Image: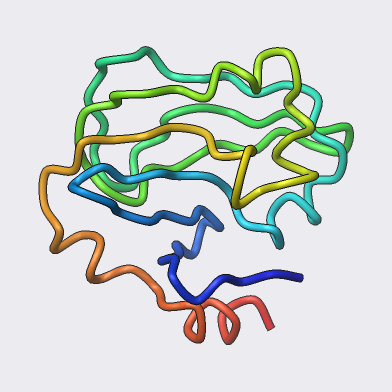
Amino acid sequence: MSIPNELKYTKEHEWVVIDNNIATIGITDHAQGQLGDIVFVELPELESNINQDDTFGVVEAVKTVADLFAPVSGKIVEINNELEESPDLINSDPYGSGWIIKVSVDSLNEYNNLLSNEDYKEFIE
């Protein structure tokens, strides 16, 4: 199971990385493994605003359905439309082509308070 050092994590199993005030958000390798084969992703509206800890979408897997929670607040500036045709990208490449949304971040304080990869490892053990 992969837990990249450069990412931050939530206890709801989302990951986030910020580059030039744009947060890329997805779900962790651990989460996709627990869900099983992902068959559908409900994506939010482009340009909508989200607040930290709000639900912004849903992932449907063969086993279950899971809400997606925002790790940071901001405006959604990009959605991974490839997930509409290939939701299994989350299973095969959760930290790469399986990203879900990109958000223009309101505050870096929220990001700085998320879990480090070490904290996340401890949390899931």
What residue do we see at 43% from left, 32% from top?
Answer: 101
What residue do we see at 71% from left, 47% from top?
Answer: 93
- How many marks are shown on the rendered structure? 0
Which quarter of the picture shows residue 31?
bottom right
Quadrant of the frame with the C terminus? bottom right
**Residue 124 position (above or below residue 63):** below
**Residue 31 position (above or below residue 61):** below
What residue do we see at 56% from left, 16% from top?
Answer: 81
Left/right of residue 21 with respect to residue 9 in the rendered view:
left
Counting from the top left corner in percent of width and height, residue 38 is at: 79, 33
**Residue 11 position (above or below residue 43):** below
Left/right of residue 80 with respect to residue 75 in the rendered view:
right
Which quarter of the picture shows residue 2?
bottom right
Q: How are the residues colored?
A: rainbow
Counting from the top left corner in percent of width and height, residue 94 is at: 66, 48
Of residues 31 and 89, the one drawn nearer to the viewer in this rendering: 89
Quadrant of the frame with the N terminus? bottom right
What residue do we see at 56% from left, 58% from top?
Answer: 13
**Residue 98 position (above or below residue 47):** below
Left/right of residue 24 with respect to residue 62 in the rendered view:
left
Counting from the top left corner in percent of width and height, residue 78 is at: 37, 23
